[in-house]
Structures are given as C-alpha cells and as structure tokens.
Image (cartoon, coloured by chain):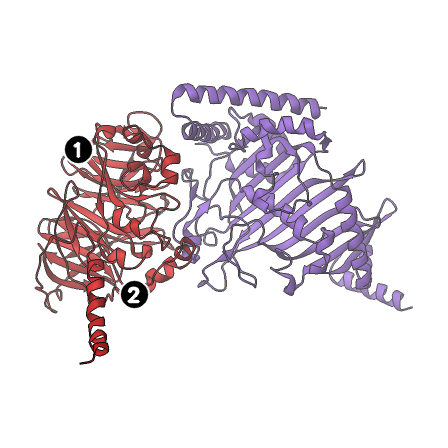
C-alpha cells in the first residue's frame, strides 16, 4: 500500500476520532437511567368514553386558569380579580374574592394558579407578579409582592448593570416567569415557578448563544414563609437543544408527583424525572412515530417572532403532562397537525389516542379525567371534556 | 344656453329627489357646475402652502373630549373630560417617527372628568373587565377575543398622520388626485369643497395614508375642514405588516378635523371620529386594519360603534421658555389622562345641554342600581386605586403621590381660570 493511500484510508478514522469528544454533551441528563417498555396495542382505546361539558363564559374575559378541586371547577380570570366556581356538569355555583385590600380581597387578577395538594389552598401568581394563597374559606393571605424583585437582596452582589454587561445564568435575578409554560406548582411549603432569562443578549433566540441551552436554568423555587432565605434555581434543558437553535420548541411542562418532578420538553420525546433539588433521576417516554423531531433553526428574535406560529403549526412536538398515581398522560401535536394523548403506566408506554384538541388535563375524579379543551368564542363558553380510559 | 339647460335639469333632479328648500336647490345647482381638475390642483396647492405657513404652534388651549361607546345603537359607556392641552409641537411639520414626536397625549391634564361604567344592552351588571389583550396572534380569532374599552390614545395621532401624509402637506400633493365637488358663498367669500383620493401607486411607499375625503377651503386658501372616509393609517399604528396593498378592514369610519383662523394663525378647533365594526370578507388573513381597538369582544355580533370628539378653544400663544416650564409639570403626570378624583357630575349635566348625543347617553346610562353619581366615583376611584398601587410600594408614598397630584390639579385649574375665565 502506498503511503498516500494509507493516509487517505486513515482520514475518516481521524475525523471520527476528532469529532468524538464533541458528541459528549456534558449534560446532567447524560448518565441517568432510561426506563420503560412499550406495552401499546392498537385496540386498547376502542372503548374510550368521552363527554363534552359546556361552561358559560359570558361574564368572563374568556382567558384564565382552571383548577379542579374536590367536585368543583374554579376559574381564575386573567383580566378580572376573583374566582368563579362551577359544578362538574358546568353549572355556575358562586364567585368569591373582590378587588381590594381586605381579608377576602386581592389587588390583581391571576396569571397562573396552583393547587396545594396538602390543604387544598389555591396559590395564585398575580398579574402584578405578587403571590397569595386562598384557603378553603376564601381568606386571602399574601405570600410575597413582586417575587423577582424580592429575591434580590440575597443575590445582591451583582447589580443590574453587572448582569447586563456580564450575564450569568447562575444568578436568579436573570430570570422571570416563563409565560410559555403557563404553570406553577406547590410541594409542601415550596412554590416552583418555571423561569427563563430576560437578558437582551443571553437568551435562546440568537444563534450565537448556544451556551444558553447548556447553562440556563428552568425552575426557580422558594419557601412560602422565607422567600429570600430559600430561593434557588435549578433544572436544565436536555441535550437536544444544543444540536440546533430551536427556541420555537423550547416550551416545557411539568407535574409533581410525590417527591418527584416530571418534566417534558417540546422537542424531546423523553420525560425526565427530577428530585426536588433538580437532580435528574431517570427518564422514560416513547417518541411518537408521527413526530419527526426535525426542526428548523432560528437565527434571530425577529425570525422567531415572525415565524413562531407558522412553524409550530407545521411540526410535531410534545406539550402538556399530567401525572396521577401510576398514570402519566402527555399531549402531543403531530407533524400532520393532529393532537394525540400518550398514555403511560408508570414508565411504560401503554398507547395513544386522538383527541383532536390540545387538552389541558385538570384532574381525575373517580374514574373520570376532566380536561379543558377550548374556548368557543362565538358562543362565549368554555368547552371541557370528561373521559375514561 | 347650455348653462341654463344644466341648471334647469339640476332643478328638476332636485325636485324629483324631494329636496324642499330653495337653499338646497341652489346648492344642488352649484354642485352640478363642472370645474377643471387643474383648478382643483391649483387651489389645493395654495391651501396647503398657506396651511403650512400659518399653522399655529407653541400654544395652550382648553380641550373638551367626549366619547360614547354603543352596542346596537344603545350607549354602553361614556367618557367626558375637560382640561388643558399643551401644544408645543402640534403641527404637521414634525418629520420623525410618529412615536418620537414630542406632542403625544402626555400634554393633556384634565381639570374635570366623568367616566361611566360599561353596560352591555340588556345587562344591569356593569362589565368589570376593561381590556383583554395579547391573546394569540393578530389573526381573526384574536379580533373576536381581544378588546379595550379605555380611551384610545391614538385618536389624535390620526390627525397628525392626516396632516403629515395627507393633502394638507404641500410636499404630499402628488400622492393624491383632486377635483372640486362644490362651490358655495358665505359672507361674500367663495368656498370650495375639494374631493381628494390617494393615488393607488403612492401607498404605502410615498404616503402612509390610504383614503378619500374632502378639504374645505376658501378662495384665499384658508382651510376650514378636512374629512376622510375609511382611512388606512399606516403611520400611527404599530402594524408590523409591510403589505404593499391595502389591508382587509375591520372598521368603517369617518374622521374629520375642523380648523379656524384667528390673528393669522390656523389652529385646530375640533376633531371627530365615528367608527363601526364590520365583518371582513376574508377571515383567513394574518393581519387586519382597524382604526381603533374594538371596545368589546366580537364587535360585529354586539353591533359596536363609537363616536369620539374633541373641541379646542381658541389658543393662547406662549413663548417657548414659558411653555417649557409648564410642559415639565404636564409631562410628569402623563399616566393619568382621563380621571380626576371626586368628579363633579353637575358640570357635565350642564355640558350635555350643548350636545344632544351626550345628553341621550347620560340618560341611557343613568341606571336605578347604578346612578351616575355613584358611577362617577366608582370608575374614578378604581382607576386611582390602580394608579396608586401600580406606582408605589407603601402607603406613605401613595399619600405623597396623591398630594402631589392635588397640587398639580390646583395649578392646572388656576391656569385654566386665568386663561379661560368663566363668562
């Protein structure tokens, strides 16, 4: 063999060897156990029972957050202070909480609400970014005013100008509520908020900030009675976000079950399970064969803004997650524009079925799951579905 | 001979249409007169040059706003406010971007106002959700859900667009076609009504407004009125749409500005706008055009319409230094335009005597469960509560804020009485 031929034959090997270190993502998700097997059969959901429930929304803004508690559905209007209660068949029951400073009053409408599973209190994230709890007697107790301002003293070594010039993803002041996730959660005395950086140059929109996907955190949490002393940020984006810049598919959703946080990301078929400190424990989840996972790269914020809606409509992705006991349900948007629901038992994939709409599952009462389906704008009503698996 | 025949034909036509008075017949005869287009162009050029040269600036004036929101013709809400308007650059001469223009709504401070609650027809409960914004993208569904029933701050921006990009700007004449539609005589002086229309090729490249309307000018070039129909104003709205053709309209509207001349200065005496919402022919577009945000969701279903008007008093010209010192005070309070604490309703009931529409609206909105007096206080107080909460973190700061505002109100009312003493 000639020397030149030998060199030529070695080139592919050398290239692979050179690229190998680059394949390591150095992600906290790299070494975790992958669980789950496929138990799906095609006939499993032929006896699925689905009913529609209609709720009159004439005296609401048609925009807000729904919570299922006991045998009532509660609506927190995004544009009007207070909550409205409805029965499970959609009848209006009563409304509580007025605008004001009194014991059963609030100053701002709710952006997002969580149910405290231990005592049934509502934890409200207001449009003024303050937080309050509402107990079962509808007494309002303020938790904090604008949380992203009140976390500052503990991290006060870096002021706004420092962070502006030298963005640091390890500093909580960098973050704000992540509206795309539209969810908060409570675990014991702790509030968990999805967050994203608000920095003009350290964000996921510009292609040259790949470091953002590696180092930025996705959750902020604090104890209700000691915001400054217990505030911390945790959780990372999985490695799939480092391969190409895809902020259009950066949404994630989460659910808390026991002492674990289940997180699903739009662009990743895996569901990651973290402990309450954000340490990844294991993952599971089946990639839908109707979601290719090939997403167009975004190069700038203006491109993101211009093309987001169109791009989301044209591609498949994973959306909302719901966990109840051993059952995990996840909504998915397919490449051909359909909405399906994936069903898992524990970590095992049990199957999927078509829902037609992006369901937001609120809870389970008896054998029935209750899910918000859509706003019927023309008739000014909310449409829910009730289904049994 | 031909002229006599035309007059006779026009008289017959007028009679056939049932026009009764001699005045109406005379006007009809005059409007039948044909004027050469060159005369219209020459008159418009003269008027535009004169308008630019005599346009008043650097003045203070008293402004009285009224706005009525109706659903299926029935009043849902009324805004009434009166105050001082500081017009440091209220002129067609500003060439920058519209949102950089120093004359924004921040140069208005009310001395007195009344804002009613919002009632949909048939409802005894007032709506407590003043706006829903940012729901989805700017597609048709967003138009069904989003709304804002607050006072539209862009109401006067359209006047600026009309003056900068319309036929009253001498440099913009080539973007419009003109024809004289009417000639009439008052106090021995001839007046002309000049119809204008944006040339299709000029929009949106050379002019930012697409419209048709009329300009009323005297034979010596004084402009007394400009009115437009269904104007698409690409200058005043934050529309991120660079379509080279007209957008699909969601509103039918008229927009008029009246001018008066005093001591050689042309100043704005009133602006009025009338809007109603219509079903678009094509509901699949990603962007539509509407002159203002709809005041309630699904505006066609609810038959929504609005009328908005401002009347300005004769201006008081001040030198720039004096204006600058007043402007400092005005600018500090730009957040609160339409609400004064403890509104005095009796003054507005007196104002209604000069405006049948306002009188009708006040009557319709005076509900047994919510009399106007309590509405006045309720709307003003809730707005003040929001203003105080939004700005200040503790009670002491709120008190200071309110005290500062009371000082401002005292100052503005004193200035108002000095400039416009009650006769």
Comparing labels 2 and 1, the label whose residue is closer to the camera: 1
Subunit of label 2: A
In the image, residue A114 lies at what x, y percent? 23, 40
Residue B28 appears in the rendering = no
Q: In this view, does A126 lie to the left or right of A24?
A: right
Look at 7% across and 64% down and name the residue there.
A39
Q: What element carries label 1?
A: loop
Residue for badge 1: A189
Q: Colour of chain A?
A: red
Marks 2 and 1, how far apart at CA: 40 Å
In the image, residue B362 lies at what x, y percent? 55, 35
Q: In this view, does A85 lie to the left or right of B103?
A: left
In this view of the protein, which residue sits in the foreground, B211 or A374?
Answer: B211
Going by the picture, which residue comes out furthest to the bottom?
A: A1
In the image, residue A106 lies at what x, y percent? 32, 31
Q: In this view, does B243 lie to the left or right of A322?
A: right
- Quarter of the image where the N terminus of chain A is located: bottom left
């Amino acid at each position: 063999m000639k020397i030149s031929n030998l060199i030529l034959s070695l080139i592919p090997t050398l290239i692979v060897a050179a690229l190998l270190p680059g394949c390591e993502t150095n992600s906290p998700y790299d070494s975790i156990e992958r669980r789950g097997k496929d138990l799906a059969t095609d006939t499993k959901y032929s006896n699925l029972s689905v009913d529609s429930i209609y709720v009159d929304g004439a005296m609401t803004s048609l925009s807000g957050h729904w919570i299922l508690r006991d045998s009532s559905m509660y609506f927190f209007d995004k544009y009007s202070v207070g909550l409205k209660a409805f029965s499970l068949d959609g009848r209006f029951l009563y409304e509580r909480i007025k605008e004001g400073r009194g014991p059963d009053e609030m100053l701002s409408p709710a952006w997002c609400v969580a149910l405290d599973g231990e005592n049934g209190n509502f934890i409200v994230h207001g449009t003024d970014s303050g937080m309050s709890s509402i107990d079962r007697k509808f007494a309002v107790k303020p938790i904090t005013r604008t949380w992203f301002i009140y976390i500052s003293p503990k991290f006060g070594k870096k002021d706004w100008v420092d962070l502006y010039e030298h963005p640091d993803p390890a500093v909580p002041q960098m973050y704000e509520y992540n509206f795309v996730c539209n969810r908060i959660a409570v675990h014991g005395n702790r509030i968990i908020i999805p967050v994203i950086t608000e920095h003009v140059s350290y964000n996921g929109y510009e292609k040259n900030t790949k470091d953002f996907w590696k180092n930025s955190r996705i959750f902020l949490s604090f104890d209700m009675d000691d915001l400054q002393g217990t505030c911390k940020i945790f959780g990372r984006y999985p490695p799939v976000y480092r391969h190409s810049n895809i902020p259009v598919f950066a949404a994630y959703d989460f659910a808390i079950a026991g002492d674990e946080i289940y997180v699903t990301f739009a662009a990743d078929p895996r569901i990651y399970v973290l402990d309450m400190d954000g340490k990844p424990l294991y993952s599971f989840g089946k990639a839908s064969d109707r979601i290719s996972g090939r997403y167009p790269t975004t190069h700038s914020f203006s491109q993101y803004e211009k093309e987001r809606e169109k791009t989301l409509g044209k591609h498949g992705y994973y959306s909302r997650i719901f966990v109840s006991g051993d059952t995990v349900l996840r909504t998915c948007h397919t490449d051909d524009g359909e909405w399906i629901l994936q069903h898992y038992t524990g970590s095992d994939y049990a199957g999927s079925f078509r829902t037609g709409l992006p369901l937001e599952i609120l809870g389970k009462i008896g054998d029935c799951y209750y899910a918000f389906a859509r706003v019927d704008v023309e008739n000014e009503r909310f449409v829910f579905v009730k289904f049994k698996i | 001979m031909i002229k006599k025949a035309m007059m006779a034909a026009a008289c017959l036509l007028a009679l056939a249409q049932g026009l009764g008075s001699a005045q109406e017949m005379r006007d009809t005869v005059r409007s039948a007169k044909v004027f050469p287009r060159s005369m219209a162009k020459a008159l418009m050029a003269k008027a535009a040059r004169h308008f630019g040269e005599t346009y008043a600036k650097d003045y203070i004036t008293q402004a009285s706003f009224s706005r009525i929101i109706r659903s299926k013709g029935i009043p849902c809400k009324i805004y009434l406010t009166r105050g001082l308007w500081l017009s440091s650059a209220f002129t067609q001469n500003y060439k920058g971007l519209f949102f950089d223009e120093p004359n924004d709504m921040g140069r208005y401070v009310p001395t007195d106002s009344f804002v009613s609650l919002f009632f949909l027809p048939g409802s005894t409960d007032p709506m407590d959700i003043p706006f829903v914004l940012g729901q989805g993208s700017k597609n048709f569904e967003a138009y069904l859900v989003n709304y804002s029933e607050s006072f539209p701050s862009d109401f006067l921006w359209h006047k600026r667009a009309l003056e900068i990009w319309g036929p009253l700007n001498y440099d913009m004449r080539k973007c419009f076609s003109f024809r004289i539609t009417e000639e009439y005589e008052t106090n021995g002086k001839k007046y002309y009504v000049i119809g204008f229309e944006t040339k299709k090729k000029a929009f949106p490249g050379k002019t930012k407004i697409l419209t048709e309307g009329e300009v009323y000018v005297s034979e010596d070039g004084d402009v007394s009125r400009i009115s437009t129909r269904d104007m698409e104003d690409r200058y005043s709205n934050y529309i991120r749409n660079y379509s080279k053709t007209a957008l699909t309209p969601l509103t039918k509207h008229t927009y008029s500005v009246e001018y008066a001349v005093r001591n050689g200065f042309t100043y704005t005496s009133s602006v009025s706008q009338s809007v109603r919402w219509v079903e678009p022919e094509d509901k699949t577009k990603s962007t539509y055009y509407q002159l203002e945000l709809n005041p309630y969701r699904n505006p066609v279903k609810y038959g929504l319409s609005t009328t908005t008007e401002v009347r300005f008093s004769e201006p008081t010209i001040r030198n720039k230094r004096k204006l600058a010192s007043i402007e400092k005070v005005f600018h500090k309070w730009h957040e609160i335009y339409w609400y004064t604490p403890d509104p005095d309703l009796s003054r507005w009931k007196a104002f209604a005597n000069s405006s049948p529409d306002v009188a009708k609206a006040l009557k319709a909105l005076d509900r047994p469960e919510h009399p106007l007096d309590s509405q006045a206080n309720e709307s003003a107080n809730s707005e003040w509560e929001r203003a105080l909460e939004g700005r200040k973190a503790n009670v002491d700061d709120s008190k200071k804020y309110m005290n500062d505002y009371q000082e401002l109100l005292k100052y503005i009312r004193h200035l108002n009485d000095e400039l416009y003493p009650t006769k």
